[in-house]
Amino acid sequence: MLAYQKLAEGAGRFGAPDGARFYSIARGSAMECKAIVDAFAVLQLAEEDTRRHAMELLTRIVEMLTRMGRRGDPLRESAPESTTTTTTTTTT
């Protein structure tokens, strides 16, 4: 659950370094999920097909979060710093 929360929090950040930090935390949480799936296999709590599918999905998630963390949030990098605009008028 923490992985999803950190992913959402990272998406809500405007600065690339700040977003990258949350993507990195989400990536760590996804890696922890992979360890849990491995533990399920050792304890024989999941069928092999289910474990394999879960590991494939988690691997894709980790890869995605790795890329997002390296770039920050590409959707937010182009976002304006402020929503207000400043106009300058000159009088002579």
Image (cartoon, grey):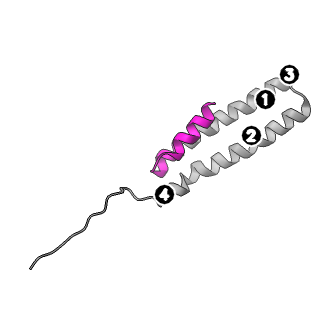
- For mark 4, give the secondary structure: helix
Q: Residue furthest bottom?
A: 92
Dots 2, 1 in contact, CB < 8 A: yes
Q: Position of residue 68 (x, y in %)?
A: 60, 50
Label 2 sits on residue:
58
Label 3 sits on residue:
45
User: Which amino acid, by three-letter code, is at mark 4?
Assistant: Glu
- For mark 3, give the secondary structure: loop
User: Which amino acid, by three-letter code, is at mark 2?
Assistant: Leu
Compared to residue 13, the image places residue 39 above or below, namely: above
CA gap between label 1 and label 4 equals 35 Å
- For mark 2, give the secondary structure: helix
Judged left or right of residue 88, residue 33 is right
Whether residue 59 appears in magenta in the rendering, the answer is: no
Q: Which of marks 1 and 4 is nearer the N terminus?
A: 1
Mark 4, residues whose alpha carbon is within 10 Å: few (<14), some, or many (≥20)?
Answer: some
Q: Earlier in the sequence, mark 4 or mark 3?
A: 3
CA gap between label 3 and label 2 equals 18 Å
Label 1 sits on residue:
37
Q: Residue sitting at 52 percent across and 40 percent down?
A: 9
Q: Residue sitting at 56 percent across and 41 percent down?
A: 8
Judged left or right of residue 17, residue 86 is left
CA gap between label 4 and label 2 equals 26 Å
Closer to the camera, 83 or 11? 83
State which quarter of the image contains the N terminus: top right
